[in-house]
Image: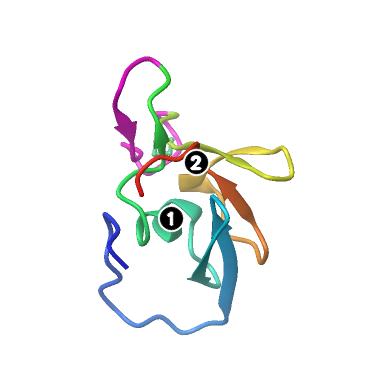
């Protein structure tokens, strides 16, 4: 994994498979989506008002910088959403 975040401690719990822009990924039960995505990616999404990319800011549900889309049509704040098995995250191609 070459993401922005690194898991510093082994965490017990079931492995939770999900995808990021169609690529397989794996989280641990209880992981928040922001951490799970940023283990694999350098950002969460493209910035809608300019050429940059965004990776969240406050990590506590206040700044609204971490919205990502899901294939089922939901838009969720990655910092307040637990990873669910089979979740299909759509980032818009950010952060590879
Ligand atoms: S990182 Fe600020 S609302 Fe999610």
Residue 55 found in image quarter: top left
- Is 69 situated above or below 23? above
Residue situated in front as seen by the camera: 23 or 54: 23
Residue situated in front as seen by the camera: 18 or 11: 18
Label 1 residue SS: helix
Location of residue 28 in the rendering, given as x and y in whole percent from the top left corner: 50, 73
Circle 1 packing at 10 Å, graded few (<14), some (14-19), many (20+), is: many
Q: Which residue is mark 1?
A: 37
Q: Where are the magenta residues, as a range?
A: 49-63
Contact? badges 2 and 1 (CB < 8 Å): yes
Q: Which residue is mark 2?
A: 91
At 43% from the left and 20% from the top, the residue drawn is 48
Location of residue 7 in the rendering, given as x and y in whole percent from the top left corner: 30, 70
Location of residue 2 in the rendering, given as x and y in whole percent from the top left corner: 27, 63
- Indicate which disc, 2 or 1, sits on the residue closer to the N terminus: 1
- Is 77 situated above or below 88? above
Q: How many numbered circles are shown?
A: 2
């Amino acid at each position: 994994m070459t993401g922005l975040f690194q898991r510093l401690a082994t965490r017990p719990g079931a492995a939770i498979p999900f995808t990021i822009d169609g690529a397989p990924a794996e989280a641990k039960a209880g992981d928040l989506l922001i951490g799970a995505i940023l283990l694999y990616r350098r950002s969460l999404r493209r910035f809608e008002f300019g050429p940059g990319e965004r990776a969240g800011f406050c990590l506590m549900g206040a700044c609204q910088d971490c919205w990502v889309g899901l294939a089922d049509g939901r838009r969720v704040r990655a910092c307040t959403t637990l990873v669910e098995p089979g979740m299909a995250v759509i980032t818009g191609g950010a952060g590879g």
